Amino acid sequence: MALAAADGAGGGHVTDAAAGANAFVAVHLAEARPLADRLVPLLDRPDAFVAELEAGLRNLADPASLDELRRVVPGGPVALGVRAPLTRPIHGAIRRACRGRPDSALWVAERAEREPYLEVRAVACTLLRISFDDDPERSWQLVRRMARNADNWIAVDTLAGVAALGILLESFRWAELEQLVYARSPWERRLVGSTVATLPFEVVPEDRPRLAGGPALSLLDQLIGDADENVQKALAWALRSWVHVDPTGVGRFLDEQAARAAVDSDGHRARVVRDALPAVDPGRAGRLRAVLAGVRRAPNAPGTSKASRAAIAFGDLLAVDGATPIARLVPRAARASGAWVDPPIQELERSLAE
């Protein structure tokens, strides 16, 4: 979707690019299907599976697609440049072959996740969707590892669908997602918004209202005001998607955040609200645009989110007077008099000092 939008700069260019892409896919589709068939017998041999997958994907790579990707995501990600229609037969064959074999799916996913290429890691996401039913804990831990290693929005947003599935299967995973609002990596913070954005589309439309009782808006409330542009885009996406779940709650949220952005001249918060407005009714959208008139982001302005303020406060707690975290929690008089003695804590304090 993003690549198609990015190509919209010039009419003739788009037509030529689309025609070239379609021609490339038509020629190479005959190679993609046999590759999918070759991969299925290798599902119990992860190393061989990944080696065959990478070799086959290299033969399907389109340099023009890789150029498009680098234009849309400057500086990342590591990819081969395989167009999506050529990977669909692979994902479909793997899904069919792994039904009833969640252990094999997880085994191969763990191996595929260690590879750098975007297309290979996307296969890991498909495999994780299968393994969650049988081994949710190990599957979730692999999701977390992939989030820690992410360095671009495409990888994060692909992973978000898997994280959403994990939450739907085990609602206590919301608490683990909440931890990511304090993450140092903006990609882990983006995963919070992307997961909320994806959740409504992981269930049938008639089940979406059941999601309204969850903590989604609370998580967005903690992150809105984040200074990172990629996080801001995910938050706006999440709000546009959550309209399908709780339109009243989203409307109230936008009212509150717009008012706060106007009072504080908070450009980070205002951007998220503005980008979410296409999903609400025109009357409310017009009113909120008027509230936010003139509120713009200042260059290098610090984050204003609740999560960023909490992280800064916690960092200050750990860094006052150059003391170690545990030492600062003990009254100075007690430390000076030697009245406080707890060998296990002293050992931990010593290791922190080192």
Image: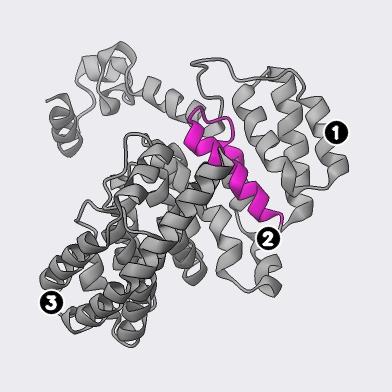
Q: Give the side of residue 248 with respect to residue 82, left or right.
A: right
Residue shown at the point (60%, 49%) measured from the top left: 238
Instruction: Determine whether label 1 and label 2 are within 8 Å by CB.
Output: no
**Secondary element type, mark 2:** helix
Residue shown at the point (33%, 20%) measured from the top left: 331
**Secondary element type, mark 1:** helix
Tell me the distance, in whole angstroms, between the alpha carbons under discs 2 and 3. Answer: 42 Å
Instruction: Determine whether label 3 and label 1 are within 8 Å by CB.
Output: no
Dot 2 or dot 3, earlier in sequence: 3
Q: How crowded is mark 2: few (under 14 residues within 10 Å), some or many (20 or more)?
A: some
The residue segment tinted magenta is 221-243
| Amino acid type for the residue under numbered disc 1 | Arg
Q: Position of residue 177 (x, y in %)?
A: 45, 52
Q: In which quarter of the image is the C terminus?
A: top left
Tell me the distance, in whole angstroms, between the alpha carbons under discs 1 and 2. Answer: 25 Å
Q: Give the side of residue 145 with respect to residue 266, left or right.
A: left
Along the line of sight, the residue nearer the viewer: 122 or 110: 122
Q: Is residue 70 highlighted in magenta?
A: no
When the figure is inspected, residue 320 is found, relative to residue 155, above or below; the finding is: above
Q: Position of residue 23 (x, y in %)?
A: 40, 63
Dot 1 or dot 2, earlier in sequence: 2
Residue shown at the point (37%, 51%) measured from the top left: 155
Name the residue carrying label 2: 212
Q: Quadrant of residue 242?
A: bottom right
Q: Where is residue 7 in the image (x, y as percent from the top left)?
A: 51, 44
When the figure is inspected, residue 91 is found, relative to residue 311, above or below; the finding is: below
Instruction: Residue 45: give its label.
Output: 3
Along the line of sight, the residue nearer the viewer: 243 or 303: 243
Instruction: Residue 127: give its label.
Output: none
Name the residue carrying label 1: 287
